[in-house]
Amino acid sequence: MSNKEIIEKKYIEAVRGIKKEWYDKADSKLYNYIINLPILLQITYLIVILDNQIFNGGIHQYFVNGYGQFAEETIEALFKIGAKKKAYIIQKALLLVNSEQYSIEIFREKFIKF
């Protein structure tokens, strides 16, 4: 099995339990689901989402589409897989988006209600 096939398989496994309505509501169900995934599935989900969002519309799209609520976890995931430069880029973007320097909990709460 190729790396791409393994990633696709793990991503499908990660999103299996996500409910469509979680995307339509300003609550923390999606966030809680993702952070409670087994670490391999969580990392796969976070990295695939980041890659897809940036490829389709840039870092701006990643944040505007609501995935910025996972920015801290995504930065950690990038460090775990050795993608330090990308982690630093997302870290800088998070500092720009969260220029008020809210705690990550308040930032996430404001973000999902945006």
Image: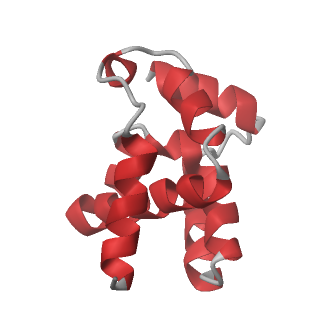
Q: Nearer the viewer, residue 93 or 45?
A: 45
- Is the image coloured rainbow, by chain, by secondary structure, or in one colour? secondary structure
Q: Is residue 13 left or right of residue 85?
A: left
Is 43 placed above or below 83 here? above
The quadrant of the image that shows the N terminus is bottom left
Instruction: Residue at 39%, 14% (x, y): give it.
Output: 25
| Residue visible at 69% across and 74% down in the picture | 79
- Picture coordinates of residue 98, whole percent (x, y): 62, 44
4 shown above or below 77: below
Q: Quadrant of residue 65?
A: top left
Q: Quadrant of residue 40?
A: bottom right
How many numbered circles does the render carry? 0
Q: Is residue 81 visible?
A: yes
The residue shown at (34%, 51%) is 12
x and y percentages locating residue 107 in the rendered image: 65, 33
The answer to which quarter of the image holds residue 39 is bottom right
User: Which residue occupies the extreme right position in the image?
Assistant: 103
Seen as rendered, the residue at the extreme front is 1
Question: Percent x, y for residue 50?
Answer: 42, 60
Image quarter where the C terminus lies is: top left
Relative to 18, say whether 40 is above or below: below
Instruction: Find residue 23 and report its horizontal and vertical position in percent.
Output: 35, 25
85 or 80, which is in the foreground? 80
In this picture, is 17 found above or below 99?
above
Q: Please give the name of the residue rendered at 42% of the width and 31% of the height, measured from the top-left corner.
A: 17
Q: Is residue 91 visible?
A: no
